[in-house]
Image: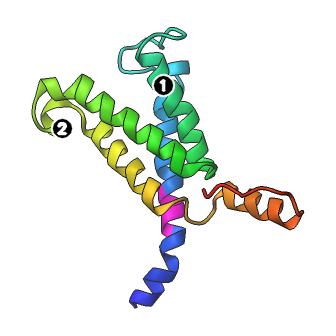
Amino acid sequence: MLTSLERLSPWAIGVFRIVVGFLFFCHGTSTLFAWPVAPYSGQTADFGAWPSWWAAAIQFVGGLLIMLGVGTRVAALIGSGSMAVAYFWKHQGDGLLPIQNEGDSAALFCWALLLLVFVGAGQLALGSVLSRKGSASGEAGVAEPA
């Protein structure tokens, strides 16, 4: 039975990556465009406003890249770091534990994205398709692992 689960683990990682990337992406779109819902504050971030616009840009672009499986490890590392900063900068002062300081989503995103840094994109990653296509056409260079 364990061998069946081991064979499916790249697919599970791929689905995990897509779901986490989509949720991260939605946080960015909410803050930048009020889609699919308005952000918690009720207003979108002003262009270039520190730190809200920059955090949302990381969420938007990083979430999209992670969802697609392109540059997954780098995008996940940047996203994980931004969530660690968000947790300690915004939430930690309001209580020791995430349940006390409303930092649950920042903490979960931080650790989920950090996991993707180590395990990679799994299956269903556009990055692996692009790297295979590049090597099949004989292009020079080394494909970046997803």
Q: Identify the residue position indicated by label 1 in the image.
A: 56
Residue 29 drawn at (x, y percent): 53, 27
Q: Secondary structure at mark 2?
A: helix
Residue shown at 60%/48% (left/top)? 71
- Image quarter of residue 33: top right
Q: Amino acid at mark 2?
A: Pro
> Residue drawn 25% across and 24% down?
89
**Which residue shows up at 61% across the image and 53% down it?**
69
Residue 55 location (% of width, % of height): 44, 25
Bin the neighbour count of mark 1 within 10 Å (Cα to Cα): few under 14, some 14-19, many 20 and up: many
Of the 4 image quadrants, the one containing the C terminus is: bottom right
From the viewer's perspective, is residue 129 above or below residue 86? Answer: below
Q: Determine crowd level at label 2: few under 14, some 14-19, many 20+ residues with C-alpha closer than 10 A.
A: some
Would you say 55 lies left or right of 107 here?
Answer: right
Q: Residue furthest right?
A: 137
Give the numbered dot on residue 4: none
- The image's colouring method is rainbow
Quarter of the figure that contains the N terminus? bottom left
Above or below, 6 against 113 in this view is below
* Residue at (61, 58) in percent of width and height: 145
Label 1, label 2: how far apart the Cα atoms are: 21 Å
Q: Specify the segment rendered in magenta.
A: 12-16
> Is residue 15 highlighted in magenta?
yes
Secondary structure under tag 1 reads: helix
At label 1, the amino acid type is Ala
- Left or right: residue 142 versus residue 73 is right
Q: Are marks 1 and 2 in contact (CB under 8 Å)?
A: no
Residue 28 place in picture, x, y as percent: 50, 29
Residue 25 vs 52, above or below: the answer is below
From the viewer's side, name the closer residue of 92 and 43: 92
- Residue under label 2, please give it: 98
Q: Residue furthest left?
A: 96
